[in-house]
Amino acid sequence: MENWLMEILNEYGYIGILLLIALENIFPPIPSEVILTFGGFMTNSSDLSIVGVVISSTLGSVIGAIVLYSIGLQLDLERLEKIVDRWGHVLRLSKSDIHKADQWFDKFGPWTVFFCRFVPLIRSLISVPAGMSNMNFGLFLLLTSLGTFIWNIVLVNLGASVGESWEDVVRYMEVYSNIIYILLILLVIISLLLLYKKRTK
């Protein structure tokens, strides 16, 4: 993988980083943590600069986020209601459930979009519910760009500072990701248990 990334970055430079990160957001071929830390490492031995890598990777992330947001727009509340009408008895969902979820996202969506940019995997997927809830596009773009920019600055600088040990950063990020996933799974389980308890009452 290292040789493959090195070839792309050497040949296409910032455009290569932009395209890789955009693809990672839509259909992850390689985790962004790998691309960003390796891109930071490459600033020590190529014409790439930290500022250039951060800017190009941020643009790539935002492009990917816009694509997923657009997909979310197609799955509006009306279409979700039709899905619930047909499959709600199987999914144990009602129209009121999706309306409550939509109201929740209207209230907390902006902060959710921002903070989820620091959570691997979720950082890309959060763009879909943002589109589904018709979140203000300008606000979505601002918070997505800001969260992504911070994430990219940290990882690119880490990759540049550790040099050839950039893979150590990736390993630490895997541990961080696993902890976040476990916490999210526990949160989902607790939410489902509370919902089930409420329904049985």
Image (tube, grey):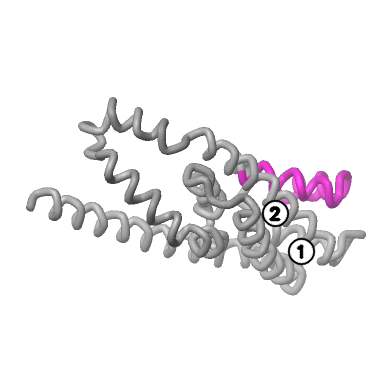
Kind of residue at disc 1: Gly
- Is residue 118 located in the magenta-colored stretch of the structure? no
The residue under the point 68% across, 51% down is 62
Instruction: Count residues near mark 1 (Cα–Cα under 10 Å), then give few for <14, some for 14-19, many for 20+.
Output: many
Residue drawn at point x = 77 percent, y = 62 percent: 54
On the image, the x and y values in percent for residue 201 come to 7, 53
Identified by mark 2, the residue type is Ile
Quadrant of residue 27 in the image?
A: top right
Q: Which mark is residue 40?
A: 1
Lower sequence index among marks 2 and 1: 2
Residue 72 drawn at (x, y percent): 52, 39
> Taking 187 as reference, is 89 above or below it?
above
The region drawn magenta spans: 2-25
Question: Label 1's element?
Answer: helix
Is the residue marked by circle 2 packed among few (<14), some (14-19), or many (20+) residues within 10 Å?
Answer: many
Between 171 and 119, which is closer to the camera in this rendering?
Answer: 119
Relative placement, left or right, of 160 versus 74 is right
> Residue 35, which numbered label?
2
Residue 124, image x, y percentages: 56, 50
